[in-house]
Amino acid sequence: MTSGGDGGPDGSVEYTLRAGKSVAELQRASEEIWSEMKKPGSLAHASALEAGYDPAALPRDASSLVRISSGAPLDPASIGVLVGAVGVVGHDIWKRVLLPRIEERWGKGAIERKRAAEKAEQASAKSAKKASAKKPKQ
């Protein structure tokens, strides 16, 4: 599996799910959007065409090009997810069609790349630490 160059050694990219979403829900949403992509006139179909792919020429199921599995959580309020894309096509379809549609459905920040999630978590912890350092001791 490869991801077009910006994933882990096995081609997977780590994400964090928030807002009470599960890996099973992400898999289901990906399959729903994949099915939608096969329907001319849909937003997902238009996105695939815009990305340079003919949806009719793509495999029948999302799992042929995009594999979603559990990963390590960033914190207790999140779920870790590994998204493995098969080849450049799988990576492009994930990044340019599936992920944007999932974000539209679930909202920005419901799924984010682990590096971005870690940075947000660190900034939040840093700000909480500063706030607690400013409180006068009794």
Image (spheres, rainbow, N blue to C red):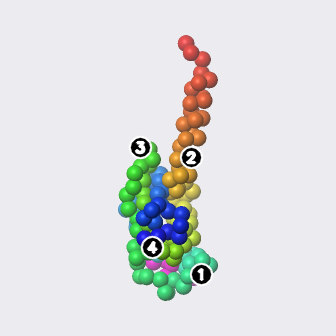
Residue 30 in view, yes or no:
no
Residue at mark 2 to residue at mark 3: CA–CA distance: 16 Å
Foreground pick, 37 / 41:
37
What's the residue at 53%, 70% (across, down)? 4
Q: CA distance from mark 1 to mark 2?
A: 32 Å
Which residues are the magenta region?
35-41
Q: Name the residue beneath numbered marker 2.
A: 119
The percent position of residue 67, horizontal first and vertical second, equals 41, 68
- The residue wearing badge 1 is 52
State which tag comes first along the sequence, 4 or 2.
Answer: 4
Q: Is residue 124 magenta?
A: no
Q: Residue 75, image x and y in percent?
A: 44, 44
Q: Earlier in the sequence, mark 1 or mark 2?
A: 1
Q: Secondary structure at mark 1?
A: loop
Identify which residue is drawn at 57% across, 56% down: 108
* Outermost residue, top side: 138
| Image quarter (top left, top right, bottom left or bottom right) of the N terminus | bottom left
Q: CA distance from mark 4 to mark 2?
A: 27 Å
Tag 2: Cα neighbours inside 10 Å, few (<14), some, or many (≥20)?
few
Which circle marks residue 76 in the picture? 3
Earlier in the chain: of badge 1 and badge 4, it is: 1
Given the image, on which type of amino acid does mark 2 rest?
Lys
Give the quadrant of the C terminus. Answer: top right
Mark nearer the viewer, 3 or 4: 4
Residue 38 belongs to the span the image colors magenta: yes
Which class describes the residues within 10 Å of circle 4: few (<14), some (14-19), or many (20+)?
many
- Upstream in sequence: badge 2 or badge 3: 3
Residue 132 sits above or below residue 136 on the image: below
* Residue type indicated by callout 1: Gly
The percent coordinates of residue 74 (x first, y second) are 45, 47
Q: Which residue is mark 4?
A: 86
